Image (cartoon, grey):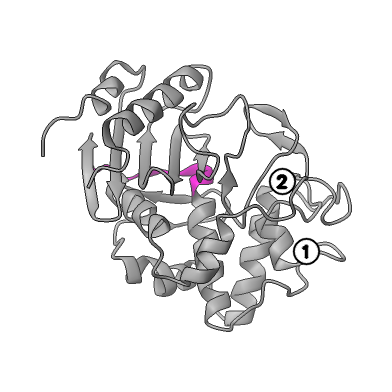
Amino acid sequence: MAESQALALVNSWPVDTVAVTVVNKAGVLARTGPETALPWASVTKPLTALTVLAAVDDGLVSLDDPAGPPGSTVRHLLAHASGLNMSDDQVMGKPGQRRIYSNRGFEVLADHVADRAEGSFADLMIDLVLDQLDMPDTVLEGSAASKVTGPVGDLATLARELLNPTIAPALTREASQVAFPGLSGVLPGYGRQDPNDWGLGFEVRADKSPHWTGANNSPATFGHFGQTGTFLWVDPVAGLACACLTDRAFGDWAIPLWPALSDAVLAEFAQRP
């Protein structure tokens, strides 16, 4: 595999460890960095969402199941529209009124699905997703909102799956579209966005500014970033996905560097056969 000029940009990043992989539907286009298992932080959420969607597809739960605060459903929890606070059970608003980013919502969601499956959510993730996609080095130990650890190769496998879904494909495609359109809210690290568009477990780029993806990523781009300096984006228009893990917490260092990398990846690989 030829060296990628785009991925060479990470050699100057102020991090000790960085690993990036770019994929299209056919497979890996470029990679750099070690296959070291690192914390995914909130990039856990797309994997949790895919597990929930697979459970819905199997009939274990429904997107319209009541879950969370009164009036909230599985769909609301996936879309950060349940009204739950960031990290506790305080209800900040009625379901469907605001986009309130909530780690606690994903924990409540995972507990609901695990109860219906009569098992643990971590085991369900293994059965429905990790084993199906051959992601043997990825593990969930703790919160379904933020406690997955795994190597970039496994994250890239998830990225490729989201680009061309095989697990609950209709539901996964639906999940990449905006749910509860028009809701405003705060995008962590980037401030208030109006609207603050999300799908079912995936942030949708839309026309957000500022943003952690590139200026040339399409509005249809979806994915997530994490506070451990991680991100995953899928651009269905460009036919590309990019997975990145680092060992430095998200901060001011990432704000110019992540979009620059994303735009370089798009320039080098978009719609490449």
Instruction: Please provide percent x and percent y for residue 88.
Output: 76, 49
Marking on residue 236:
none
Instruction: Please provide percent x and percent y for residue 40.
Output: 45, 44
Q: Name the residue nearer the viewer: 236 or 78.
A: 236
Say above or below: 187 vs 109.
above
Disc number lying in front (2 or 1): 1
| Quarter the N terminus occupies | top left
Q: Quadrant of residue 108?
A: bottom right
Q: Quadrant of residue 261?
A: top left
Q: Secondary structure at mark 2?
A: loop
Instruction: Please provide percent x and percent y for residue 161.
Output: 37, 59
- Badge 2 local density, few (<14 within 10 Å), some, or many (20+)? few
The magenta-colored residue range is 35-43
Q: Tell me what residue is drawn at x 86 percent, y 46 percent.
A: 92
Amino acid type of the residue that numbered disc 2 sits on in the rendered structure: Ser
Amino acid type of the residue that numbered disc 1 sits on in the rendered structure: Gly
Q: Tell me what residue is drawn at x 35 percent, y 33 percent.
A: 266
Chain-order first, disc 2 or disc 1: 1
Q: Is residue 42 magenta?
A: yes
Identify the residue position indicated by label 1 in the image. 68
Say above or below: 113 vs 22.
below
Identify the residue position indicated by label 2 in the image. 87
- Mark 2 to mark 1 CA distance (whole Å): 13 Å
Q: Please state if 3 lies on the left or on the right of 136 as rendered.
A: left
Q: Tell me what residue is drawn at x 55 percent, y 40 percent.
A: 219
Q: Please state if 165 lies on the left or on the right of 77 as rendered.
A: left
Q: Tell me what residue is drawn at x 33 percent, y 70 percent.
A: 131
Instruction: Please provide percent x and percent y for residue 250.
Output: 50, 27
